[in-house]
Amino acid sequence: MEFRYREIVLDELARHGVKPLPDTPPDRIREFINDLYVIEIRALRDRVRDGAIAKRDLASHVKELRKRYLLLSVAIELWTV
C-alpha cells in the first residue's frame, strides 16, 4: 500500500530526521516518533535527578518538548491525504 503524507506532516517529520517512503505506514512512523519523545522525556527526568534542572523548572521543559512533538497529538488518520 502507498501512503501520501501531507506536506506539513513531512515537514514535522523532517525536524526529527525522518523521511518516510511512500510504503511506510503512518503507525510505524508514529511509534518511532513516540519512542524519540520517550527518550527525551526520560533524559529530562535524569537531568532533574542529577540537579542539572531544578524540579520547579521541569514543567516548562516538558512544555517545550511537547511543542517539538506536536505531531503526536494529531490523529494518525490526518497524516495522509
Image: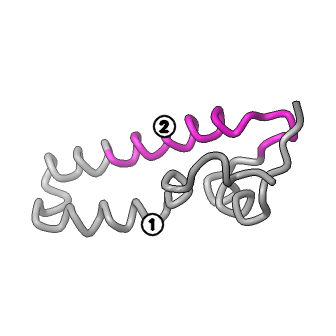
Disc 1 packing (10 Å; few <14; some 14–19; many ≥20): few
Range of residues picked out in magenta: 20-41
Residue 14, position as x, y percentages in the image: 70, 57
Identify residue type, mark 2.
Asp
Q: Is residue 2 above or below residue 13?
A: above
Q: Which one is in front, 72 or 52? A: 72
Residue at the image point whose x is 74% and y is 34% from the top: 25
Residue 68, position as x, y percentages in the image: 49, 63
Identify residue type, mark 1.
Lys
Q: Which one is in front, 49 or 81? A: 81
The residue that label 1 is drawn on is 67
Give the quadrant of the C terminus.
bottom right
The residue that label 2 is drawn on is 35
Q: CA distance from mark 1 to mark 2?
A: 16 Å
Residue 39, position as x, y percentages in the image: 40, 40
Q: Quadrant of residue 46?
A: top left
Disc 2 on helix, strand or loop?
helix
Q: Is residue 6 magenta?
A: no
